[in-house]
Each structure stands twice: as C-alpha cells, then as structure tokens.
Image: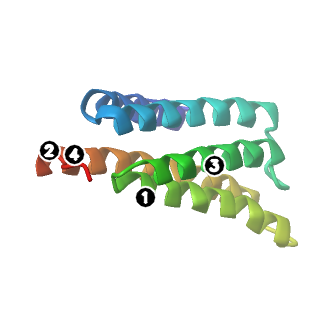
Amino acid sequence: MTIIYLFWLLVIMASSFAWRYGEKDGRRAALLTIGAAALTAIGQNYQTVWQHTNFTVMLIDLLVWLAFMDFMFASRRYFPIWMAAAQTNAVLTHFATLMAAAFNHKIYAGLASVWSIPCLLSMVAGIALDRNRGPRKEF
C-alpha cells in the first residue's frame, strides 16, 4: 500500500511542477498524467485479476496512448515524445500477454504499471531543460 502512496505523491509533485513551469504544454501534460493515473486506478479496482490480459486497464492504456500521441504531434517540445514512448511500452505489455501462452502475472502487473514512472520523470526533466534553455522562438 505504501508504494501506491509514493506513486500518487510522485504524480502530484510532477504534475504540480508541470502545471507551474511548463506553460501550455506542461499544463496539458499534467492533466493527461493525472487523468491517466486516476483512470488506471479505477480500472485496476474494477478488474483486479492479472492472470490473464487485463482488458479494462488495456483499454484505458490504449486511450491514454492515443491522447499522448495527439499531444506529441501537437507539441513543439521534445518531452511529449518520451511520454508517448513510455506509454507505448505500457500498451505493448498488454499485447504481449495476448500472444503469450503463459506468463507470470506479477511480471505483467509490474510491467504494465512501471512505465508511468519514466513518463512522469521525462515530463519533469523535459520541462526543466526547456526552462533552462530560455525562451523558445516560434516558427
């Protein structure tokens, strides 16, 4: 249970940083990450079995992936590319369970959720690097 609290603390801290310092793209990233984390938490409570493909969380991850892809193509920043890449790995984890005859449910649950950490960290690092670089000139 402590891991869940630490994860939500990381989500709140990273999203607060993005909202405060990330301008328009940071605010969009913050809303996406908070929404993704909340929907995934609801989906994990709805279907708690990980011995087979968790279709509820898979559907949520697919929708979040589409949102991140839209964000990536609309943004002129680099950090949305890394956020979308991390979400792509989460989605691919679900598809791997569809193709695998047998898999360890603990590894599946871990791999499906671990990609949220690099997603959050890339958001914070990208915004921090953008701020250090100075104002960006528009095309």
Tell me which corner region of the image, top left, top right, bottom left or bottom right, holds residue 29.
top left
Find residue 38 and report its horizontal and vertical position in percent. Answer: 60, 29
Task: Give above or below for 76 relative to 26.
Answer: below
* Image position of 4 (left or right of 15): right
Query: Which residue position is annotated with label 2?
Result: 135
Pick the front one: 73 or 30? 73
* Image position of 103 (left or right of 5): right
Find residue 127 and report its horizontal and vertical position in percent. Answer: 27, 44
Asked if residue 2 shows in the view, the reply is: no
Query: Which residue position is annotated with label 3?
Result: 66
Q: Residue at x 49, y 54 (%)?
A: 73
Q: Label 1, secondary structure: give it.
A: helix
Q: Label 4, secondary structure: give it.
A: helix
Q: Residue furthest front?
A: 139
Q: Amino acid at mark 1?
A: Trp
Which is nearer the N-term, disc 1 or disc 4? 1
Q: Amino acid at mark 4?
A: Ala
The quadrant of the picture occupied by the N terminus is top right
Local packing at callout 4 (Cα closer than 10 Å; few below 14, some 14-19, many 20+) is some
Q: Label 2, secondary structure: give it.
A: loop
C-alpha span from label 2 to label 3:
29 Å
Query: Which residue position is annotated with label 4?
Result: 128
Disc nearest the viewer among 2 and 4: 2
Disc nearest the viewer among 3 and 1: 3
* Image position of 47 (left or right of 76): right
Check contact, mark 2 vs mark 3: CB within 8 A.
no
